[in-house]
Image: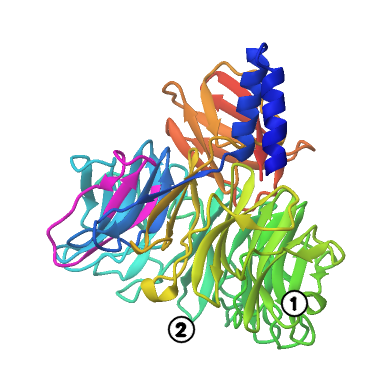
């Protein structure tokens, strides 16, 4: 350190007559030694607020957290002034669950209180702009939970007290909130869940008339276009579902399904009966290859392949990959020489690499891979940190929610570029387990230019935290718009799980199409609002062209997906 100051004094002396150069040195030194800013929001002084269910809408995050009375809906733009409870109701018990946004700046959410039960609400982030959309179940609770945004509407499961838990749709208005399909007539309900959008349709699972059978369904948003996939094979169902874990990849939905002859294996569907089949019997016979008896991470796409966890013929869980064909479905990484017995419980992609949080006997590990056996290695962790949870990309770094499972400490960790060593993000903020019952760092949510998360990082308990990196700049490809006339903005760019498109003027008809480097269309979605969030689930990292049409205007921009 002493040598640094000697050199600094020498450079300062040389630059005394060259103030511009000296200013540049000051700037460079500030960048070199600056760290991201970590900020805590003590929502309720004197108690732990335990924020949950963080949902990004535009440049704000909505979430449920405690107040002095109940669990209520909060909103934050990353500033102290812009962080507040929306409507602190005087009920003996309440809870709020953010669902999704289908209109610019508005959030649809389910609110559960002792007066009306769990019903559908909408908010613009203010008390005056917060109202119930519809009392779906006037005599009880609608039990709203599972949902998906499709073609500018929210499709969700709800119980009106008469038909059981069935498929509903809303455009955010009272008259526009109706039951779409009573899949099982009567009061039992089909319990729709596992919603996912793929190739201009949405998919979900629901019970059928066959007792106990759960099938994959597909819908175009209409009653006649909502139907089961291979719902009946003569007198018996073709497959049964449990812990489906669906993911969109190459215009198909991949999911876990079971038959009596094969056990649980990897299946795919294009929405038709003929196009719904088992990809491969990974573990031949009745034993399950794609088993639901272990904690398996949701599959992720990388370089044209889908990576997932599955058991081989011996029953050991390893990392497999598929291109969608039986011949192209093979074990990619043998975990035995790397971690011994264990499996990957969470996958992520970053910097064109596959990252996996592994669970092995008595410990957790973080691995990085190019998708091959020889290209797989462990990530060194600081201190005793080994227990890991959530991962996300922010400002071209991979952030990981870490835990020291020996001392019970928590910390936010980071990896930059090709680093094989994880470091503490901003600073080291551990807290012993005994001081906080929620001993983990919650989901990491990127919103606008800020990373939001819940964490017990000091003795105030589990609170809302933000990480703001105003210094670090992406070293990736420079983003420049092509043929743009300022009709819209796309952010963040680079993007990870999703991106937002914000238009500068009203329009009647709009669409956005993403094409890869080969010109293949990977996603097309209609635009309905001036600010709309587009999911990137199932799309591999890389450079894409975003072609936007708004009435008779067009703009094409580069979009990097990490």
| Callout 2 secondary element | loop
Question: Residue 99 — which label?
Answer: none
**Residue 147 seen in render:** no
The vertical placement of 450 against 96, above or below, is above
Q: Residue 34 location, x and y as percent?
A: 57, 39
The vertical placement of 250 against 396, above or below, is below
**Residue located farthest toward the top when viewing the structure as drawn:** 17
Circle 2 is placed at which residue position? 211
Q: Which of the two residues, 352 or 37, is positioned nearer the viewer here?
A: 37
Residue at the image point whose x is 67% and y is 11% from the top:
17
Circle 1 is placed at which residue position? 339
| Callout 1 secondary element | helix
Answer left or right for 113 relative to 374.
left
Q: Residue 199 location, x and y as percent?
A: 61, 49
Badge 2: how crowded within 10 Å, few (<14), some, or many (20+)?
few
Q: Which of the two residues, 461 or 266, is positioned nearer the viewer here?
A: 461
Question: Magenta region: which residues?
Answer: 73-100
């Amino acid at each position: 350190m002493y040598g640094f100051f000697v050199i600094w004094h020498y450079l300062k002396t040389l630059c005394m007559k060259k103030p511009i150069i000296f200013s540049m040195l000051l700037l460079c030194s500030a960048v070199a030694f600056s760290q991201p800013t970590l900020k805590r929001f003590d929502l309720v002084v004197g108690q732990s607020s335990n924020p949950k269910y963080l949902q990004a809408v535009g440049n704000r995050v909505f979430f449920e957290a405690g107040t002095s009375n109940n669990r209520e809906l909060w909103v934050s733009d990353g500033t102290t002034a812009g962080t507040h409870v929306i409507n602190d109701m005087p009920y003996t018990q309440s809870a709020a669950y953010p669902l999704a946004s289908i209109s610019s700046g508005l959030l649809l959410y389910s609110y559960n209180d002792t007066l009306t039960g769990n019903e559908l609400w909408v908010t613009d982030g203010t008390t005056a702009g917060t109202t119930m959309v519809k009392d779906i179940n006037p005599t009880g609770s609608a039990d709203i939970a599972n949902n998906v945004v499709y073609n500018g509407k929210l499709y969700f499961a709800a119980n009106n007290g008469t038909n059981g838990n069935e498929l509903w749709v809303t455009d955010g208005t009272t008259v526009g909130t109706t039951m779409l399909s009573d899949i099982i007539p009567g009061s039992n309900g089909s319990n729709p869940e596992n919603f996912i959008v793929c190739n201009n349709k949405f998919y979900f699972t629901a019970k059928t008339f066959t007792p106990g059978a759960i099938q994959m369904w597909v819908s175009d948003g209409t009653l006649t276009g909502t139907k089961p996939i291979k719902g009946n094979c003569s007198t018996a169902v073709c497959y049964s579902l449990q812990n489906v874990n669906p993911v969109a990849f190459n215009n198909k939905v991949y999911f876990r399904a079971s038959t009596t002859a094969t056990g649980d294996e990897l299946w795919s569907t294009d929405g038709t009966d003929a196009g719904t089949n088992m990809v491969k019997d990974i573990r031949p016979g009745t034993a399950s290859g794609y088993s639901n008896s272990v904690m398996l991470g949701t599959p992720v796409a990388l370089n044209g392949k889908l990576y997932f966890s599955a058991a081989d013929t011996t029953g050991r869980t390893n990392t497999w990959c598929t291109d969608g064909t039986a011949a192209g479905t093979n074990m990619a990484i043998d975990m035995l020489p790397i971690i011994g017995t264990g499996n990957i419980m969470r996958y992520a992609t970053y910097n064109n690499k596959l990252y996996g949080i592994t669970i092995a006997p008595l410990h957790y590990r973080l691995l990085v891979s190019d998708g091959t056996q020889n290209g797989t290695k462990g990530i060194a962790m600081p201190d005793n940190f080994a227990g890991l949870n959530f991962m996300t990309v922010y400002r071209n770094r991979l952030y990981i929610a870490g835990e020291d499972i020996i001392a019970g400490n928590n910390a936010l960790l980071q990896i930059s570029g090709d680093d094989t060593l994880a470091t503490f993000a901003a600073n080291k903020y551990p807290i012993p387990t005994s001081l906080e019952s929620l001993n983990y760092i919650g989901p990491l949510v990127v919103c606008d230019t800020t990373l939001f998360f819940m964490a017990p990082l000091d003795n105030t308990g589990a609170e809302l935290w933000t990480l703001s990196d105003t210094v670090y700049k992406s070293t990736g490809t420079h983003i420049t718009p092509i043929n743009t006339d300022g009709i819209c903005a796309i952010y963040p760019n680079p993007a990870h799980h999703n991106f937002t498109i914000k238009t500068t003027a009203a329009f009647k008809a709009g669409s956005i199409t993403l094409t890869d480097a080969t010109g293949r269309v990977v996603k097309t979605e209609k635009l309905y609002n001036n600010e709309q969030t587009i999911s990137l689930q199932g799309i591999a990292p890389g450079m894409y062209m975003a072609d936007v049409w708004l009435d008779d205007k067009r703009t094409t921009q580069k979009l990097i997906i990490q």
